[in-house]
């Protein structure tokens, strides 16, 4: 695992051309801190300011909780290699068990979240979850991982999802990216999850290359441009944005499946952060919904919008 403060992606000396990596597992020691900063910046002047500031506090708790946690254990190497041979992800989210390190992550996160400023409904959900037993928490973990959230407990699941993000990012960071393989049409090569959004990056190692971002483990994986990340179609792809906006966040719409996933032009604005900028551009989702397109990107903090 990389140390705190080191760049997530290794720099290449100027003049050398490198092939873009297929997959970039996250550095959990910088991922949540950077996300917290971005949520804070976006929440300074925004109609969703209260929610964005709450998510900034939650991301800060995700960052800090790691200090007190043991390193989570990966499945044995032979199990991971067998999955690879079958084109399956090494850490399949839908077959994950509620292990003690995750239970400790959730417990620690709930304790730290108590200090975060939040709206009363979020506070009430936090208190209910803090008082919930292990079996209830396990059920909620399963609901998040199978994307089947009960509408009446969406607020509780925000904290469960936040704990899962920390846990899966810490697992993903231990994997050798060279052993990761493409999963299905556009599944995360680490956990098999659907993309949250995609980003066109400006890294020296991958200029103007597109990566999909995973909502659960935070891994980025290379994906060709002008191709639907939901159904794989290359026909009927177009881009929509909010009129008068900066144009750095667009929706890639597909007329084959009538779905869309946002695309962040990070090469034009390096501050863009997949989770935070997705939440902050909810207006674009409302526009697309009116136009008849279904949201394909998974974001645990946008359920029930
Ligand atoms: Zn993933
Ligand atoms: Zn499609």
Image: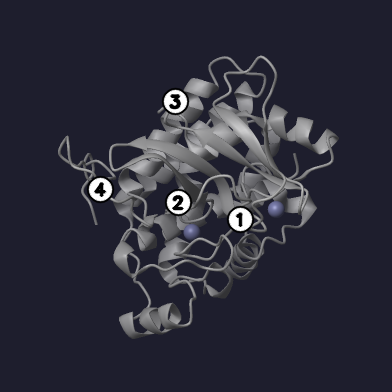
Disc 4 crowd, CA 10 A, few/some/many (<14, 14-19, 20+): few
Q: Earlier in the sequence, mark 4 or mark 1?
A: 4
Which residue sits at x=36%, y=58%?
A: 170
Q: Cα distance, mark 3 to mark 4?
A: 21 Å
Q: Which mark is residue 268?
A: 3
Q: Is residue 127 in view?
A: no
Q: Cα distance, mark 4 to mark 2?
A: 23 Å
The quadrant in which residue 78 appears is bottom left
Q: Cα distance, mark 2 to mark 1?
A: 29 Å
| Dot 2: element | loop
Q: Is residue 55 left or right of residue 284?
A: left
| Dot 4: element | loop
Q: Which mark is residue 131?
A: 1
- Quarter of the rendering occupied by the N terminus: bottom left
Q: Is mark 2 within 8 Å of ligand 1?
A: yes
Q: Earlier in the sequence, mark 1 or mark 3?
A: 1
Q: Earlier in the sequence, mark 2 or mark 1?
A: 1
Q: Is residue 37 left or right of residue 231?
A: left
Q: Is residue 218 in view?
A: yes
Which residue sits at x=44%, y=36%?
A: 35
Q: Is residue 218 left or right of residue 128?
A: left
Disc 1 crowd, CA 10 A, few/some/many (<14, 14-19, 20+): few
Rendering coords of residue 163 (x, y %): 49, 54
Residue tagged by mark 2?
218
Which residue sits at x=49%, y=65%?
A: 191
- Quarter of the rendering occupied by the C terminus: top right
Residue tagged by mark 4?
18
């Amino acid at each position: 695992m990389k140390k705190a403060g080191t760049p997530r992606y290794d720099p290449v000396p100027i003049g050398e051309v490198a092939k873009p990596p297929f997959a970039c597992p996250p550095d959990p020691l910088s991922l949540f801190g950077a996300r917290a900063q971005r949520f804070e910046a976006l929440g300074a002047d925004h109609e969703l300011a209260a929610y964005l500031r709450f998510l900034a506090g939650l991301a800060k708790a995700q960052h800090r909780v790691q200090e007190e946690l043991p390193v989570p254990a990966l499945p044995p190497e032979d199990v991971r290699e067998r999955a690879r041979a079958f084109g399956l992800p090494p850490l399949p989210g839908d077959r994950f068990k509620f292990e003690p390190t995750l239970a400790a992550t959730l417990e620690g996160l709930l304790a730290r979240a108590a200090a975060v400023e939040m709206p009363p409904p979020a506070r009430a959900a936090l208190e209910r979850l803090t008082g919930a037993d292990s079996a209830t928490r396990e059920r909620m973990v399963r609901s998040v991982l199978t994307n089947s959230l009960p509408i009446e407990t969406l607020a509780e699941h925000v904290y469960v999802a936040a704990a899962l993000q920390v846990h899966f990012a810490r697992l993903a960071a231990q994997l050798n990216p060279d052993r990761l393989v493409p999963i299905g049409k556009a599944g995360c090569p680490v956990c098999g999850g659907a993309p949250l959004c995609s980003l066109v990056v400006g890294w020296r190692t991958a200029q103007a290359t597109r990566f999909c971002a995973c909502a659960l483990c935070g891994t980025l994986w290379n994906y060709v441009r002008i191709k639907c990340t939901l159904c794989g179609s290359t026909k009927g792809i177009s881009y929509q944005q909010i009129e008068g906006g900066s144009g750095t966040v667009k929706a890639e719409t597909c007329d084959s499946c009538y779905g869309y996933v946002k695309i962040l032009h990070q090469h034009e604005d390096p501050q863009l952060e997949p989770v935070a900028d997705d939440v902050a551009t909810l207006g674009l989702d409302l526009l697309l919904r009116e136009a008849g397109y279904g949201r394909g990107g998974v974001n645990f903090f946008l359920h029930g919008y």
